[in-house]
Structure formats: structure tokens, C-alpha cells
Image: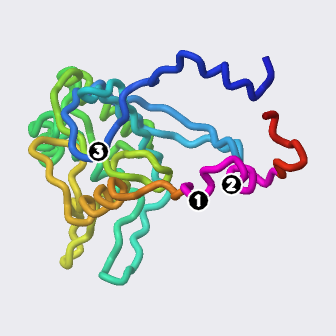
Amino acid sequence: MGMFDLTSTTGIKDAGNFLSAGIHKAKFNGLTLGSIVSQKTGETYNTMTLSLDIDNYGEFTHNFFEPTSDERSEGTYGLQPSQKDHFMVSLRQIFDALDSKIGEMIDNNTVTINNKTVDLSKISTFEQLVRLAKALTDSYIGTEVEIKLIPQNNGFNGIPGFPARINKAGALGIATRFIGHDLVLSQSEQKKIDAKLNSRPTNMGGNATLSGIGDALGIDNNEGDLPF
């Protein structure tokens, strides 16, 4: 069989359900510490992987990369959150979605693991933070939540990438909540979803004839380039 033999597609079936944009019901499957190696540079990046089981889809994972900067920048509309801000707000949203008691322990600096109090001021590395997050959430595996997915630049639907904001008083806050309960889409998020739903493929109607197809592919059919 040649490389381009179309009989290779005989009996082809859908590989699985398409993960649409919007708000989905899901179950929390855990947080893990991981790493990703860049195919372009070979550099290794540390990650925290969020695993979910999304209704009518199945297993879904999202990698939160280790922040490399905690510097905030000035933008058109004021101070912009740092990479660290976005990660910390993402982590707090996960905690809040699973159990408000986790956030209360953090706010009161009374976090306990296996009946031992954790000194949060001594959490100084990404690895330590993710391992703590895993310990705090392992018992909530199977908890039902909602997850928000919006169109990404790569053509797929995923978790919003910039969940944090800085208010006028300089305090860290939430720009969009991507995991939790009774989630809602912001106006800009709904616009992105609508734009993707209303997009149409390139009209190839003008190239519907064999000669048109040949022109589109750069093939001269008169010279016998096509095998028919």
C-alpha cells in the first residue's frame, strides 16, 4: 500500500467526543507535580497538572507552568498581575471549588496536614507548594465541580489563561473564575465562543471541478499529473 492510498481510511470512526467551549460539569481527579520538555529548545519546565473527568467527554488535564516572575507591570488600564499572581489565583480557585474550609485555613494560617500544622511562610519553592496543594486536595478526588473552557489561540478549548486582576486599590482579585460552582461566562468570553461558533471554513466552491482542484493544488491535469 502506498503512502497516499485512500483505502487506509476504510472504516474510520470518530476518535472521541469533541470538547466544546462553555461551562461543563466535571469531577476533580487530583493535582500532581510534573514537568514538560520543550520540543524546540529541549528545556524542561515544571508544572502543576490539574486532572478532571468532564461529563460527556472524559479525562481532561491542564498544565499550570511554574511562574518565572513575580513582577507586576503597568498596562493601559492600570497595574497588571504577574505570572505568580495568575498562578496563585488559579490555585486558590481550585481550593475554593473543592471546599471553602481550605481557603479559611490559608487565610487564618492554620493549615494542617496529618494533624501537623504547616508554616506557610516556609513554603519557598514551586515543588513545595504543589506538594502541599496535592496533600490538601487528595481527599477531595471525585468531588463534583464546574469548569469553564474558552477558545484558545491553538484552536482548542481550554481554561482561561489570565484569571487574576489587580483592583484600583492594588489588591489581588479574580478576573474570571474558571472552576467552581454556578460559573458564568463574562461578556468577552462569550464573544470568543460566539466568534468560533460563527466561523466558517474557506469557500472552495469555485474549485469544485477537477480542473479547479488541479489549479488549487498546483497540478497541471493536462500533463497527466492526476492518476485518473
Mark 1 or 2, nearer chain start? 1
Task: Judge from the rendering whether residue 153 lies leftward or rightward of residue 178; answer left or right.
Answer: right
Dot 2: what SS?
A: helix
What label does residue 212 carry, if any? Answer: 2
Q: Nearer the viewer, residue 52 or 96?
A: 52
Image color mode: rainbow
Within-10-Å neighbours for mark 3: few <14, some 14–19, many 20+:
some
Q: Nearer the viewer, residue 212 or 40?
A: 212
In percent of width and height, residue 210 lies at: 69, 47
- The residue that disc 3 covers is 91
The correct choice, above or below, for 103 with respect to 34 in the image is below
Task: Judge from the rendering whether residue 42 lies leftward or rightward of residue 184; answer left or right.
Answer: right
Residue type at mark 3?
A: Leu
- The residue that disc 1 covers is 206
Image quadrant occupied by the N terminus: top right
Residue type at mark 1?
A: Gly
Task: Judge from the rendering whether residue 206 lies leftward or rightward of residue 106; answer left or right.
Answer: right
Callouts 1 and 2 close, C-beta under 8 Å = yes
Quadrant of residue 196 in the image? bottom left
User: Start and end of the magenta stretch?
Assistant: 204-219
Q: Nearer the viewer, residue 135 or 197?
A: 197
